[in-house]
Each structure stands twice: as structure tokens, then as C-alpha cells.
Amino acid sequence: MSEKKTGARIALIPGDGIGIDVLREAEKVLRSVGAAGGIALELKSFDYGAERFLKTGVSLPEGALEEFRTFDAILLGALGDPRIPDMRHAADILLGTRFGLDLYVNHRPVKLLAENLCPLKGRKEKDLNLVIFRENTEGLYVGMGGIFKRGTPDEIAIQEDVNTRKGVERILRYGFEFARKKGKTKLTMADKSNVLTYGHDLWQRVFTEISSEYPEVESRHLYIDALTMQMIKNPGQFEVIVTCNMFGDIITDLGAQLQGGLGIAASGNINPEGTSMFEPVHGSAPKYAGKGIANPLGAILSVQMLLDHLGFADAAARIEQVVIKSLKEGKTTRDLGGNYSTSQVGDFISRNVGA
């Protein structure tokens, strides 16, 4: 039997805008719950973001990925700055890390922590508790394609949708293994194979093969447009959803809105065999930076995911309990109806997880 993990090395990337604000609070909570739970934490902050890029022209320095591999996990704030219109630095850092560390699982829990947050009438906490797994390294996001005759009436833009058997199989298998491990009994695969004939035919065939290996999990297929309708009509019917990169990007934001908005949505970019990265799903919102109004709960719940992933289940559960307490008592930022500042929310949760 392997020894129980007692510590972790975490890389912190505050990024840009409100990413800096929310990660400050997430770090505060991480340190507090670590101290309370006897978790030996080694934290190192990296200044990768717009300021560094504007000064040096470097987004992700040479050797950065190799250094990241020496950490147990990465915690990212948010990236994006209007001074860099093409957001090249953000793409280099975020997509570069996802692809470079092969973070092929995008893990997005969609869980209603307080019923008043759901925009659907009459929904209770028990009615919304699902997980979406988005394939994170293929599809339309690989950047293959090009533009021919740019700026002319005959301009042609081609964007390639890349799906490999390896990529499809491993994300589907991860979803089924998660269902088995967590006692989930239902898994839905969503695609658009009635139109996207080739790539999504591959998804169909691999799904059929793999689902037969998990008879205890009820598996079904829905076209992505039907899935979005069903997520609104009856989200309680879903437990685990697996889909491709583009569709996953869309339906996870739908899921975030169902649970109360992007401000409380957390995510993990997972490599089961290596260093994984966790981040709130909201953007950098530069116009709100430094004003004390950014909601830090998405970043704090990303810490919860990070700790759970590393095997610190008790500490992770403690964070979720205190986040629920903050929501129930209205100790939140204004977007959720409270009057707390960003740092006050962080202080409240940090104090309570350490109690």
C-alpha cells in the first residue's frame, strides 16, 4: 500500500485582471486549509501574463513546461488584456500548457450549491449535480487550417476539426472510469454525427465499443443540440457527460449558468499521469480588476478540485462546506446578492476552513 500523501508543490499563475484578485483569495484559502489539515504546501508564484509579455515579448518562457512538471498541480487565475488585442500571450500560456502537458481532460463539475442561484424555477440542490468531461487537446482548437486570398472577395477560411482514435478513446474511458469510481450510473456522450460525418462517426464507434466494457453504467447518446435543450428542461437526468472540445466549451458555460454563473464555476485540466492545472472559468475582466468586486468563489472551488485531485479529500470537502455556508448566509460579492468585497469573501472562507 502506498503512503498517504502529506504535502504538495503548487505552481501559482495569477495572470491578468481579476485573475490576480481572485487568485490572491484562493491562495489564502489554500494556505489556511492546508495548515488546518496538516498539509505541507510549497507554493511558487509565476508572473506569466500580460505585464511580462509587454515588457519582454515572452509569454511562456523556454523551460516553463519542464518546470511545471516538477509540481503536483498548477493553479491559474485568468488571462487576457486589451493591450494585447490578439490575446497571443493568453493563448500561448493557456493552450500551450494544455497541449504541452497533455491535459486532455477538461473536468467541469456542474453542482447547485444553493437553490436560489439556479435560474430555473423550482430547482433544488438535488436536481443539479453532474460532471462534464470535455476533450481538451483536439477538435477545432488545434489551430490547423489557414486563410487563402485574405481580404479579397474570394477569401477562403479553413479550420480543421481533428479527432484521433487515441484522443477520443482516452476521454471516453476517463468518463466511464470516473462514473465507476464515483458510483455514477448514467453517462451521456454528445456529438453531431448526423452532420459531422467523419470525426463524429469515430466518436460513435469508439463510444459503442467502450460502453460495452462498463455494463453497470447506463450509456446513451444525444446530439449536442438535443443535449442543450435537455440540460434546461431536466438537468437532473444527467450525471456524467462526455463530449468534444468545441461542444464541451459551449455546454460547460451553460452548466455554469445553471449553477449560478461563471463567478462560481471551477474547472480542472487533467493529465491523470502528470501535472494538472486548475482554474476558475471566468475571464480576466480587466475593467473590474483591483476594485474588490470580483467573485473569488470560482477560484476557491478550483482549489477544492485541486486538493481532491491530489487526494486531500477532507480538506476539499471542508472548502465546499464553507463555500455553501457563505452562499446560504449571503456572505458573497454583489453578483450573488451580497455586499462583501473580494477580500472579505476570501477572509470569511479562509477563517472558517481553518477553524
Image (cartoon, helix red, strand yellow):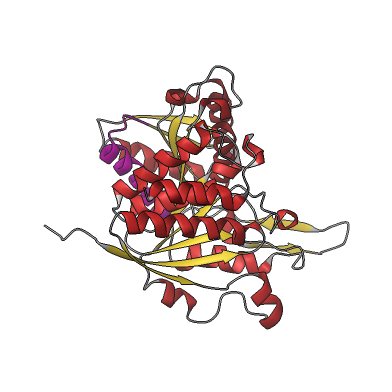
Indicate whether 229 appears above or below 248. Answer: above
Residue 110 visible to the viewer:
no
Residue at the image position 43 percent from the left and 41 percent from the top: 322
Queried whether the magenta region covers residue 331, the answer comes back as no
Q: What range is drawn magenta here?
A: 166-186
Q: Is residue 52 left or right of residue 198?
A: right
Q: Where does the N terminus fall, quadrant-wise?
A: bottom left
Q: Is residue 20 left or right of residue 62?
A: right
Indicate whether 58 appears above or below 284. Answer: below
Indicate whether 112 appears above or below 344. Answer: above
Residue 88 visible to the viewer:
yes
Our reading of the magenta stretch's main secondary structure is helix
Expressed as whole percent of the image width and height from the top left, the position of residue 352 reads 42, 46
Expressed as whole percent of the image width and height from the top left, the position of residue 74 reads 44, 63
Residue at the image position 56 percent from the left and 59 percent from the top: 77
Along the line of sight, the residue nearer the viewer: 14 or 275: 14
Indicate whether 322 appears above or below 13. Answer: above
Along the line of sight, the residue nearer the viewer: 309 or 31: 31
Expressed as whole percent of the image width and height from the top left, the position of residue 311 reads 28, 53
Expressed as whole percent of the image width and height from the top left, the position of residue 327 reads 52, 35
> Farthest residue toward the left?
1
Along the line of sight, the residue nearer the viewer: 151 or 253: 253
